[in-house]
Amino acid sequence: MTTATTLHDVLGPATPSTRFLRELIGEILTPAATALPSVTVTQAEPVPYDFGSPATGALVRLRGTADGTDWSVFVKVLQNPRHWRLIDRMPPPARAAFIAEFPWRAELAAWDPALTERLPDGLRVPKLYRLVDLGPDRIAVWMEDIDADPSPWSPSRFARAAELLGELAGNRSDPTLWAGSGDRKSTRLNSSHIT
C-alpha cells in the first residue's frame, strides 16, 4: 500500500505527509542519522477492535520498510465527542453538556512524567513518537506498535500482571498524578512530541 489515497481511506485527517513519515521512521530506526530514509508503507489497517469510546476516532497500525528495514507504528486518533459516530443518539440537552465536559484528552496523561516516572518496575507505556493536532478537537497519537504475545499465560504471569496493575491503581490515589489529565486545552507533555 503506497498511495496517499489508500492511506487517507484508513487514516482520514491523520494521513501523514511523505516528509512526516520519513522523519518519524528515520528517528525511530536511526536516531543519529542525518539523511532521511526512503520509506514505503506496505500495510495500513484499522485495528480489529470495536471501540465504543466517544474519545476514539481511529485505531490504525502502519507497517512498512525504510531502506530495507521493517518498521511499524500505531496511530490512535483522539477526538472531542462531537465527532463521535453515536453522538446523535443522545438527547440534545445531554449532548451539549457531554460535548462540553467530556475529558477526551485525558488519555494523554499516560505519557506525563508524573505517571511514567511512578510506574512499577516491569510496567511501561508505549513510546510516544508524536502528537499531531488535526484541527478542530482531534489529535493523532503516533506511538510504538507493540505486538501482543499470543502464548497462553501461566498463573504466575497473571499474578505478576495483577500485582503490577494493583500497584499502579494504588498510585491513582495521589491527586498530583492526574492533575490536568482532563484538561481539554493543554497537556504537560514535553513539547518535542507535538507537531
Image (cartoon, grey):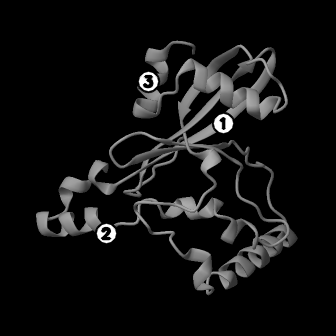
Q: Nearer the viewer, mark 3 or mark 2?
A: 2
Q: Secondary structure at mark 1?
A: strand
Disc sitting over residue 15 in the figure: none
Residue annotated with mark 2: 101
Q: Secondary structure at mark 2?
A: helix
Q: Residues within 10 Å of mark 3 (few under 14, many from 20)?
A: some
In the figure, residue 97 lies in which quadrant? bottom left
Of the two numbered discs 3 and 2 on the same chain, state the one appearing first in sequence: 3
Of the two numbered discs 1 and 2 on the same chain, state the one appearing first in sequence: 1
Q: Indicate left or right for 54 with 50 as reference.
A: left
Dot 1 and dot 2 residues touching (CB under 8 Å): no
Q: Nearer the viewer, mark 1 or mark 2?
A: 2
Q: Residues within 10 Å of mark 1 (few under 14, many from 20)?
A: many
Q: Residues within 10 Å of mark 2 (few under 14, many from 20)?
A: some
x, y percent for residue 27 = 75, 32
x, y percent for residue 10 = 46, 29
Amino acid at the residue labelled 2: Glu
Residue annotated with mark 3: 8
Q: Which residue occupies 80% across, 30% down?
A: 29
Residue sitting nearer the eye, 127 or 71: 127
Residue annotated with mark 1: 73
